[in-house]
Image (spheres, rainbow, N blue to C red):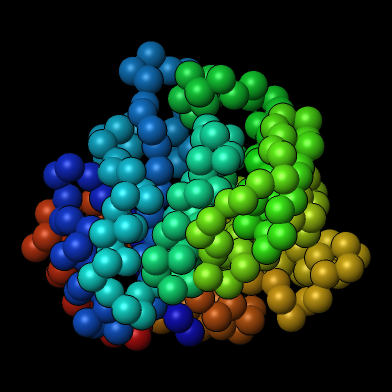
Amino acid sequence: MRIATTIFLTDQSITPVRLALELEQRGFAGLYLPEHSHIPIERTSPYPFGGVLPPEYGRTLDAFVALGQAAAVTERLALGTGITLVAQHDPIDLAKQVATLDHLSGGRFTLGVGHGWNREEAEDHGVVWRTRRERVRDFVALMRALWAEEPTAYEGEFCSVRASSAYPKPAGGAPRILVGGAAGPKLFAHMADYADGWIPIGGRGLTETLPVLRDVWEKAGRDPETLRVVPCGISPTAGKLAHFADLGITEVVLQLPSAPEAEVLRALDEYAQYL
């Protein structure tokens, strides 16, 4: 099983360069980074995991800048977002960022796609909350048009682009796209429509939900062998990883503390037993 990691990199944590070097030297498979552009102080959106919102959410580094630094000092480490709040971006600019990072890293990038939980943050970006999922699907379709080998136009409900010269191209034609979010028919339908799989947070309930997703996937005409499910933000135990392996999962993303270098390296030492 491939063992990757995720962390809220901030202005107070270990740096992207130090972390990336340590991960590759120790044999970890990848680094996935979350994003939040800002956290409005006055908000009504509850923290999805309960309790007080941890301070690192408002201090998160830009994921693409941080991953660019990580790419520059590594050769094998996979790079990803876990996740990108796609609806909060200009899709033409985001397509360029993704293509550039994938090109410069030699095809090591995975785009984790999320719909968001912080309504106030999204609304500051002009996102209409009730249509954010459809907006994300539209934006991904536009990005795929810009990544296509031949100039390709796209006209959608929320965005459009003329047939264009748009380089660089992602190294593999298009990066792997994994959609985040809680299990449900709408999420699974969107996933089967435009993505390569699922990046669920925590991985609870997969015994029940994976058969449902696989059924939706096959009914949409997708090859069941191509479906990728990558649980993210895992606190590992040997039993938990064995359970995931029994479910056919081949990659997991372990949660690192958002902390200075010494604490993060201690966590990596602990996680090394699972490599």
Rendering quarter of residue 27: bottom left
The answer, for residue 92, to whether it is visible in the render is: yes
For the question of whether residue 205 can be seen, the reply is no
Residue at horizontal 74 percent and vertical 51 percent from the top: 152
Image quadrant for the C terminus? bottom left
Q: Give the mark count.
A: 0
Q: In this view, does 1 lie to the left or right of 157?
A: left
Task: Tell me if residue 218 comes above or below residue 67 in the rendering.
Answer: below
Name the image quarter holding residue 272: bottom left
Q: Nearer the viewer, residue 185 or 37?
A: 37
Q: Which residue is drawn at 72% across and 30% down?
A: 158
257 above or below 31?
above
Q: Viewed as shown, does residue 237 lie left or right of 231? A: left
Q: Which residue is drawn at 43% across and 18% down?
A: 43
> Within the image, what quadrant is residue 246 found in?
bottom right
**Apparent side of residue 130 relative to residue 258 in the rendered image (left or right):** right
- Residue farthest left in this picture: 262
Q: Which residue is drawn at 39% across and 69% down?
A: 105
> Residue 20, position in %: x, y?
25, 68
Q: Nearer the viewer, residue 98 or 244?
A: 98
Q: Percent from the top left, x then y, of residue 235?
A: 38, 65
Q: Looking at the picture, how far across and down is residue 145, in whole percent?
A: 70, 51
Where is residue 92? Give x, y as percent: 57, 40
Q: For the view shown, which residue lies furthest in the top direction?
A: 42
